Amino acid sequence: MTATNGRPADGAARPTAPSAARHDTVAAVVGQWQAVHPDLDTGPMEIIGRINRCAALLQQAEDAPLRRAGLSRPEFDLLGALRRTGHELTPSELTRETFSSGAAVTKRLKLLTERGLVERRGDTRDRRVAHVRLTDAGRDLVDAVLPEQLAYETTVLGGLDTPGQGELASLLGELLVQLEGRLGMLRV
């Protein structure tokens, strides 16, 4: 049983993960909040805060291979969606595949078309619908950048042993399934 501050009701210290014991940035923030509001459970902040902080740090560094290729992360996501599905997609399908807004996808497709990385083809039955496919240059760019990106990600995760990586992937997968189900229904 736990009290409202995330600690066991008997006052004993809550078990901490090895990484939390290193006193990362989030641990400092949590400590500050616990000093101001000792009655609040800051446990969720320890998870969500770390996920957000990791995502921000990874985003900053992982875009380096993409920048060298002249791409932004969202542009690469569009190209990657076309490459991994292996067929033409409509802008609406790309919106769903990349978790982007329709306007953002339209803007990115315009830039990628101008660079010769994607081609648009109108639908023969409905002029309002476009079909997008990778050009040879687009496919070659994705195929060249992806191994570099994966090498970077392997290096980043190198501090975790293989079982630790598997456990983290599994836990994040469980969280993602829950969030996609719960929060997906809340979108307006």
Image: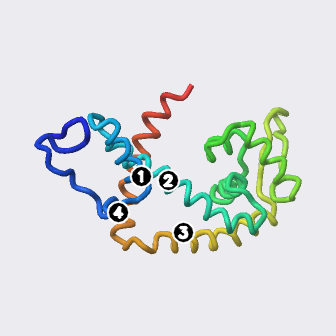
Is there a contact, CB below 8 Å, between mark 2 and mark 1? yes
Coordinates of residue 12 in the picture (x, y in percent) = 14, 49
Secondary structure under tag 4 reads loop
Label 2 vs label 4: CA separation? 14 Å
Q: Nearer the viewer, mark 2 or mark 1?
A: 1
Q: Which residue is mark 4?
A: 19
Label 3 vs label 1: CA separation? 22 Å
Coordinates of residue 177 in the picture (x, y in percent) = 42, 44
Please name the amino acid that badge 2 sits on: Arg
Looking at the image, is mark 2 or mark 3 earlier in the sequence?
2
Foreground residue among 106 and 33: 33
Q: Which residue is mark 2?
A: 53
Q: Nearer the viewer, mark 4 or mark 3?
A: 4
Q: What residue do we see at 40% from left, 41% from top?
A: 178
Q: Quadrant of residue 103?
A: top right
Q: Residues within 10 Å of mark 2 (few under 14, many from 20)?
A: some
